[in-house]
Amino acid sequence: MGRHIMSEDKTTLTDAVHDLLKKAIIEQGLKPGMRLPEDTVGEQFGVSRTIVRHAFVRLEHEGLIATRRNRGAFVAEPTRDEAQHVFEVRRCLENDVIRLLCPRMPSGGYETLEAHVRQEETVRGKNGPVSIRLAGEFHMLLARLTGNPVLTRYVSEVVLRCSLIMSLYARTHSSECAVDEHSQIIEAIRAGDATRAIEIMEHHLGAVAERAELSGQTDSIQSILSHYGKELAQ
Amino acid sequence: MGRHIMSEDKTTLTDAVHDLLKKAIIEQGLKPGMRLPEDTVGEQFGVSRTIVRHAFVRLEHEGLIATRRNRGAFVAEPTRDEAQHVFEVRRCLENDVIRLLCPRMPSGGYETLEAHVRQEETVRGKNGPVSIRLAGEFHMLLARLTGNPVLTRYVSEVVLRCSLIMSLYARTHSSECAVDEHSQIIEAIRAGDATRAIEIMEHHLGAVAERAELSGQTDSIQSILSHYGKELAQ
DNA sequence: TGCAAGCATATTGTATCCAATTGACGTTTT
DNA sequence: AAAACGTCAATTGGATACAATATGCTTGCA
């Protein structure tokens, strides 16, 4: 049956539904490939299909769902190739963030970052989902400190898409980010050493991408079909 | 009255309306700040408000329009600060493109680029709108050659937003891009000299941004209100 | 005559309704 | 019995209808 969502009408219904679905996808409540019927979602949240549809448009633009004409919406299920593209852009953008940040870290920026890292350390190992979320937020925070909302949005988008990708391809979720590398990045930026910060960042993200098994294989027909080999093998 | 748009139903109505509005905004048929009533647009294209609304969601996400609750949609009118943020991201992304492209320009890439530059040269000076469009497309083409669709989309978005910004703030449109610098960038990439290519690109985009008068002033309250001073002055 | 409050209109936000496409199941035919 | 065809339920694409909010104008009052 469901009831209305918005506690206060500061935002529109579409925004509310969008945010909830986004959260559900990131937290893997909704798994990649899962179908999202419009009226099911609408009933669940107590809104009409119109609203759900609008939310879908935005989610698709953000790469979190895919829609197929007359077939509806599905939680995005990026191929390995697509995943690699997202990771590549993430590396580019995060390096850009470092370059911008080195000469103009705002006052209080380091304190904010260190506070965040401390928070990450306290939950390390314990609460899996929370530590994954915090790891992502570290990178978004870094972007936000550049003071550039356009860049911040792009970074957020790719970081979130990476979360989705990891949930698809990662062998182990192993907290997704090494917390101590976050500290090292902060220190390198504080020292004004962009080159070193980028080096660490590259290693940091490279480790994540590798864990996702994106490096070796490609999306060849063979690699796809290999998963189905057993059913045909006699 | 208006008739239906889609010649063939390869795409959805929303896509068609979205593309038309996008084109109209970029070509300055729709000028920044202009109001976009839903039913007016709908009647014009022969579709219902539902479709227009969906198109608006995407256009807003792309930063080409701004919507205010219960007040409708307007063609985006970025402030100088916002404009500067867009330009900054554009510089970052285009430099990233160069870094990626240097070690892996696809075969036939240089030929495609040179053909494009030749095309730019033939219309140089003559057809203003066309040469502006071609200049933008050079940068999108460069991005596309990386083979990364995610990066290509982001570059396209900021390039288009820059067009909008130039139409707002540029003193002279002066073709917006120096064609010979495009050639120089190609040559630097061909030589594998990313540093030099980035240097030229920075100068290239810096010149564009300067023409937009973004460098000096900021968006302080004073600078905004100064435009209205006369009306109150006795 | 100038300002404010209230009504009227226009436009947006949301829900419902109709048409068109899809996928599945059952039937028929070879 | 297997394959192809046709019908049917379910769901999406799109339009219309209704409710809520903002804007503009008129009118009343100081």
Image (tube, coloured by chain):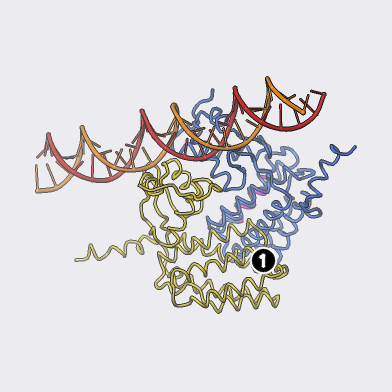
Chain colours: A yellow, B blue, C red, D orange
Q: Position of residue B158 (x, y in %)?
A: 63, 51
Amino acid type, residue under disc 1 in the picture: Ala
Q: How many marks?
A: 1
Query: Which residue is located at x 47 percent, y 64 percent?
Result: A163
Query: Which residue is located at x 58 percent, y 54 percent?
Result: B154
Chain identity of mark 1: B
Res A129 seen here = yes
Residue sitting nearer the eye, B4 or A32:
A32
* Quadrant (top left, top right, bottom left, bottom right) of the N terminus of chain B: top right
B104 relative to B10, above or below? below
Relative to residue A96, is residue B38 drawn left or right?
A: left
Q: Position of residue B165 (x, y in %)?
A: 70, 46
C7 relative to B145, above or below? above
Q: Position of residue B222 (x, y in %)?
A: 81, 49
Q: Answer few, some or many: residues within 10 Å of disc 1's Cα (few below 14, many 20 plus, some between 14 and 19).
A: many
Relative to residue C2, is residue A7 drawn left or right?
A: left
Query: Which residue is located at x 37 percent, y 44 percent?
Result: A39
Relative to residue D11, is residue B44 drawn left or right?
A: right
* Quadrant (top left, top right, bottom left, bottom right) of the C terminus of chain B: top right
**Quarter occupied by residue A21:** bottom left
Res B11 seen here = no
**Secondary structure found at label 1:** helix
Q: Position of residue B10 (x, y in %)?
A: 44, 39
The residue carrying mark 1 is B194
Q: Residue furthest right?
A: B234
Based on the picture, tell me whether residue B112 belongs to the magenta stretch: yes
**Quarter occupied by residue A216:** bottom left
- Range of residues picked out in magenta: B110-119
**Dominant secondary structure (helix, strand or loop) of the stretch shown in magenta:** helix
Query: Which residue is located at x 23 percent, y 62 percent?
Result: A232
**Quarter occupied by residue B44:** top right
Based on the picture, tell me whether residue B116 belongs to the magenta stretch: yes
